[in-house]
Amino acid sequence: MLVPAPSSPFSGAGAVGVGFRPELAADLLSAPGAVDFVEVVAEACFASPAARREASAIARIWPVVPHGVKLSLGSASGIDMDRARRLGALCRELSAPVVSEHVAFVRGGGREIGHLTALPYTLEAARAVARNVAAARRALPDIPLLLENAACTLRFPGDALGEGDFYAEVVARTGCDLLLDVGNVYANAVNAGVDPAELVGSYPLERVAMIHIAGGVVEHGFYFDTHAHPVPAPVFDLLAQVVARSGPLPILLERDGDFPPFAALAAEIATARAIGRSAPSRPTLTRPRLAGPTPAEPRLAPARPGLPASRAILLQNSLDASPFEASALAEVQARVAELLTSPVDPPPEAVAPFDAEDVARSRAILQRKRVDDALPLLPRLSSHREAAARLGARCVEASPRAPSLTAVADALRIAAAAVDDARLAPEAIVDRLLLRARFVGPAGDGSVRPRLLPFIRRERLPGGRVVWAIKGIGSSAEVRLIEPRR
């Protein structure tokens, strides 16, 4: 069976977009022709009614692509169907031409990891993605679902497939095309000590339907895809290599922090647009779809030396699916989730067969990610950027991860700590009041939940000024902040 090459959901060759963020809103709205489409993080729309209303408003200006980060398509235990239904509802609300998610897992063994964790490169992991995609499709509208490759901070020992071969398996078994993040490919290549051009060439480029680019930085000898730095020249080189083989594709620039003047981002957008438009016309490519359970012969990746036999069995890959294989993947994912979220740093001898440095690095990234997720929920406090970030780091380091709505729980902790700082108190009091209007908690286990009942409360700020927050019935009811004149 032949699978037609993917077609762009956007009109015109060389379409370029950007992730829509509050810090970019004014510049984008003043020059809407700067981009051809925008991307919104689906979970941001779920967490904030204001963000969802904003996404609906900008859908009248540009095509809007919802981008999911927590569906956990790689979880051996399956996906949360309620989350999939919410994603489907958002797609319909925005009249989205396409929706995207990651080939990764964010939960295992009942634990929320809180960050995209790459999968082992095995056939069973590809099968797990295929099962979850089939389930998710029942809740999504009839639009393309694009699957994004993940950056690896934690390598699984004994991978049976090369990185590109793994994603070839994923697209073949799911029928989905790729959202190729060339920044992630570059990061994985640099950190594995391989040629980025060779690695990207191993991907099924004929099945790429969209591209992400982003910046990063080297810290302690490891390249992090931060989305908070300029796109480096080698990533633009990889972009040119991909579109030279695939033809023009939609390209999206991701920038999530440390926003420069918009002119700098506009220059990156212009570079991406020029590369996209220089690509040859896309040929009509086809790729054989795998029939049944038999995969194409993979190029095997070398196993990590010294892997204990018991763990090698857990991570083994065979041509025939089996309940043991699925349960083994679930066991490994539960172990990873435990290692990454345990309140106490595990000793090096306890992390085998994983590399202790990989685990420590991944844990540090998760701590940073918790702060990055919480601060946008504290917009006034975040105006004191450096002080708020330092305080946030101390708060999350001292607190176990909440079992649900982690960003909200962390934001409430940070706001509570900031209230005791005279410099930060006025902004922290207002931010905390607005969060309390929308959420109840934290409970004894640190969890919070949406507030369904009406809310009315006042707070007195330093200096005597009073502010009120009022919310109606329902978790999505608008919260009004009232500041009476003195």
Image (tube, helix red, strand yellow):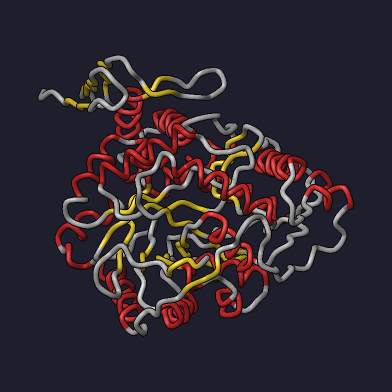
In the image, 426: left or right of 330?
A: left
Residue at image coords 80%, 63%:
304
Furthest residue toward left: 485
Res. 215 visible in picture: no
Whether residue 464 is visible: yes
* Quadrant in which the C terminus is drawn: top left
Q: Quadrant of residue 273?
A: bottom left
**Residue 368 horizontal/vertical position (percent):** 53, 48
- In this rendering, is residue 100 above or below 203? above
Q: Residue 225, position in %: x, y?
A: 51, 62
Question: Closest to the observer: 50 or 56?
Answer: 56
Could you say where residue 55 lies in the image, as x and y percent from the top left? 25, 46
Position of 311 compared to 128: left or right? Answer: right
Answer above or below: position of 92 versus 399: below
Residue name at image x 45 percent, y 68 percent: 208
Of 339 and 293, the residue lying toward us: 293
Residue 282, quarter of the rendered image: bottom left
Image quadrant assignment for residue 426: top left
Could you tell me which residue is drawn at 67 percent across and 69 percent down? 192
- Residue reaching furthest front? 1
Q: Residue at x 38, y 60 (%)?
A: 255
Which of the pair 200/7 is nearer the observer?
Answer: 7
**Closer to the camera in the image, 14 or 23:** 14
In the rendered picture of this protein, how many numbered marks are placed on residues?
A: 0
Residue 300, percent from left and from top: 74, 68
